[in-house]
Amino acid sequence: MPLIHITLAGPAASPDTIYRLQRETTQLMQDLLGKSAALTVVAVAQLPAGAYSANGRALVVAASMQATITAGTNSAAEKAAFIAAATSLLVDVNGSGEAPVYVALHELPAENWGYDGQTQAARRALHASAEQIGGAA
């Protein structure tokens, strides 16, 4: 159940560009990290040119991605592959600009986050309980 925030700075992205970022980021989450596309949420925010800075200098073009996943659900190699692919996507869509393109994966313990009012830990416990009941038949 990834929660992803993409921030672009520079000329306004077209609706097609935003949709491409949402679609392709969701696909990367599914293909590289094994996450459910149906539970992947992607928000794209647009900032004006100059809203990002590097070394104290305002930048014309920049991009970053912050993605939250459940801790312990992916290997270091899977996470590295996602970061590389997401960086390539951002550069392809927005250009490289003058600053590094940051992609950050934040891992939260299953008991510290969730959706629709339940933590991931509660969902896992419910799923495990249902499997035990189903397996006992």
Image: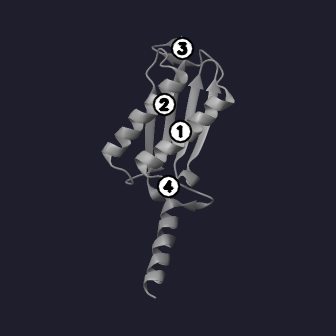
Q: Earlier in the sequence, mark 1 or mark 4?
A: 1
Relative to 137, residue 38 above or below: above
Q: Earlier in the sequence, mark 4 or mark 2?
A: 2
Q: Amino acid at mark 3?
A: Leu
Cβ–Cβ below 8 Å for labels 1 and 4? no
Relative to 32, residue 135 above or below: below
Residue 24 - label:
1
Q: Position of residue 43 (x, y in %)?
A: 61, 39
Q: Which residue is mark 2?
A: 89
Structural crowding at the residue carrying mark 2, measured as other residues with C-alpha within 10 Å and reported as few (<14), some (14–19) or many (≥20): some
Q: CA distance from mark 1 to mark 3?
A: 25 Å
Q: Which residue is mark 4?
A: 112
Q: Which residue is mark 3?
A: 59
Q: Position of residue 35 (x, y in %)?
A: 47, 52
Q: CA distance from mark 4 to mark 2?
A: 29 Å
Cβ–Cβ below 8 Å for labels 1 and 3? no
